[in-house]
Image (cartoon, rainbow, N blue to C red):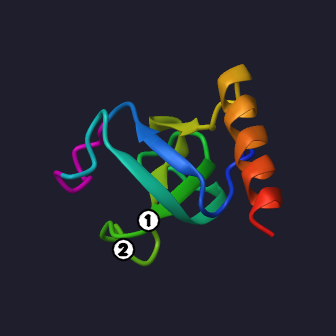
Protein backbone atom coordinates (compact mmCIF):
# COMPACT_ATOMS: atom_id res chain seq x y z
CA UNK A 1 0.00 0.00 0.00
CA UNK A 2 1.32 3.46 -0.87
CA UNK A 3 -1.06 5.58 1.24
CA UNK A 4 -2.36 7.13 -1.97
CA UNK A 5 0.92 8.92 -2.74
CA UNK A 6 1.70 9.45 -6.43
CA UNK A 7 4.53 10.89 -8.48
CA UNK A 8 4.18 14.71 -8.78
CA UNK A 9 2.20 15.03 -5.52
CA UNK A 10 3.21 17.91 -3.26
CA UNK A 11 4.48 16.85 0.17
CA UNK A 12 4.60 19.12 3.22
CA UNK A 13 7.27 18.10 5.74
CA UNK A 14 5.83 17.89 9.27
CA UNK A 15 8.79 16.36 11.13
CA UNK A 16 12.47 15.88 10.48
CA UNK A 17 14.71 12.86 11.01
CA UNK A 18 18.30 13.60 12.04
CA UNK A 19 19.62 11.88 8.88
CA UNK A 20 17.68 14.22 6.58
CA UNK A 21 19.57 17.07 4.89
CA UNK A 22 18.95 20.53 6.39
CA UNK A 23 16.58 21.62 3.59
CA UNK A 24 14.16 18.82 4.54
CA UNK A 25 12.59 20.50 7.56
CA UNK A 26 9.07 21.10 8.88
CA UNK A 27 7.19 23.56 6.70
CA UNK A 28 9.15 22.79 3.52
CA UNK A 29 7.23 21.54 0.46
CA UNK A 30 8.61 19.06 -2.07
CA UNK A 31 7.47 17.36 -5.28
CA UNK A 32 7.36 13.55 -5.12
CA UNK A 33 9.65 11.84 -7.64
CA UNK A 34 9.33 8.22 -6.45
CA UNK A 35 6.89 6.32 -4.20
CA UNK A 36 8.21 3.14 -2.57
CA UNK A 37 5.81 0.67 -0.91
CA UNK A 38 6.74 -1.44 2.14
CA UNK A 39 10.12 0.19 2.69
CA UNK A 40 11.74 -1.34 5.81
CA UNK A 41 12.39 1.01 8.73
CA UNK A 42 16.13 1.31 9.42
CA UNK A 43 15.71 1.28 13.20
CA UNK A 44 13.50 -1.79 13.30
CA UNK A 45 10.12 -0.08 13.29
CA UNK A 46 7.21 -0.73 10.96
CA UNK A 47 7.81 -0.87 7.25
CA UNK A 48 5.78 1.61 5.25
CA UNK A 49 5.59 4.02 2.36
CA UNK A 50 8.72 5.99 1.54
CA UNK A 51 9.24 8.93 -0.81
CA UNK A 52 12.01 10.48 -2.86
CA UNK A 53 11.73 14.07 -4.04
CA UNK A 54 12.83 16.18 -6.98
CA UNK A 55 15.74 18.53 -6.31
CA UNK A 56 16.45 16.88 -2.93
CA UNK A 57 19.43 14.58 -2.34
CA UNK A 58 18.65 10.87 -2.06
CA UNK A 59 19.48 9.33 1.30
CA UNK A 60 21.25 6.40 -0.31
CA UNK A 61 20.58 3.35 -2.48
CA UNK A 62 18.48 1.61 0.19
CA UNK A 63 16.97 4.60 1.95
CA UNK A 64 14.21 7.13 1.32
CA UNK A 65 12.11 9.68 3.20
CA UNK A 66 9.45 8.20 5.49
CA UNK A 67 6.01 9.22 4.18
CA UNK A 68 4.71 9.45 7.77
CA UNK A 69 6.83 12.60 8.16
CA UNK A 70 4.97 14.33 5.31
CA UNK A 71 1.41 15.38 4.51
CA UNK A 72 0.03 15.34 1.00
CA UNK A 73 -1.08 18.77 -0.20
CA UNK A 74 -4.21 18.54 -2.30
CA UNK A 75 -5.44 21.52 -4.30
CA UNK A 76 -8.79 22.94 -3.29
CA UNK A 77 -11.79 22.71 -5.59
CA UNK A 78 -12.66 25.91 -7.49
CA UNK A 79 -14.97 28.19 -5.52
CA UNK A 80 -17.78 30.38 -6.93
CA UNK A 81 -15.38 33.21 -7.81
CA UNK A 82 -13.08 30.83 -9.70
CA UNK A 83 -16.05 29.42 -11.64
CA UNK A 84 -17.20 32.96 -12.56
CA UNK A 85 -13.73 33.92 -13.84
CA UNK A 86 -13.50 30.70 -15.86
CA UNK A 87 -16.91 31.39 -17.41
CA UNK A 88 -15.90 34.98 -18.28
CA UNK A 89 -12.65 33.85 -19.85
CA UNK A 90 -14.40 31.13 -21.83
CA UNK A 91 -16.92 33.72 -23.09
CA UNK A 92 -14.14 36.14 -24.07
CA UNK A 93 -12.41 33.36 -25.99
CA UNK A 94 -15.60 32.68 -27.98
CA UNK A 95 -15.96 36.41 -28.87
CA UNK A 96 -12.37 36.56 -30.15
CA UNK A 97 -12.97 33.94 -32.84
Membership of 53 in magenta stretch: no
Residue at the image point whose x is 29% and y is 42% from the top: 17
Instruction: Report helix, strand or loop for mark 2.
Output: loop
**x, y percentage for residue 33?**
53, 68
- Mark 2 crowd level (few <14, some 14–19, many ≥20, 10 Å Cα): few
Horizontal side, residue 3 vs residue 73: left or right: right
- What is the magenta range? 16-22
Q: What residue is shown with label 1?
A: 63
Residue at the image point whose x is 59% and y is 40% from the top: 46
Looking at the image, how many numbered discs can be counted on the residues? 2
Q: What residue is shown with label 2?
A: 60
Q: CA distance from mark 1 to mark 2?
A: 5 Å
Query: Against 14, is 52 above or below?
Result: below
Camera-side residue of 89 and 27: 89
Quadrant into which the C terminus falls: bottom right
Asked if marks 1 and 2 touch (Cβ < 8 Å), the reply is yes
* Residue furthest out toward the top: 80
Residue at the image point whose x is 75% and y is 59% from the top: 93
Amino acid sequence: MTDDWRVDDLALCISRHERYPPEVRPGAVFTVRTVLADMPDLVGGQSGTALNFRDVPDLGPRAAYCARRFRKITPAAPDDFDAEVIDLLAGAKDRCR
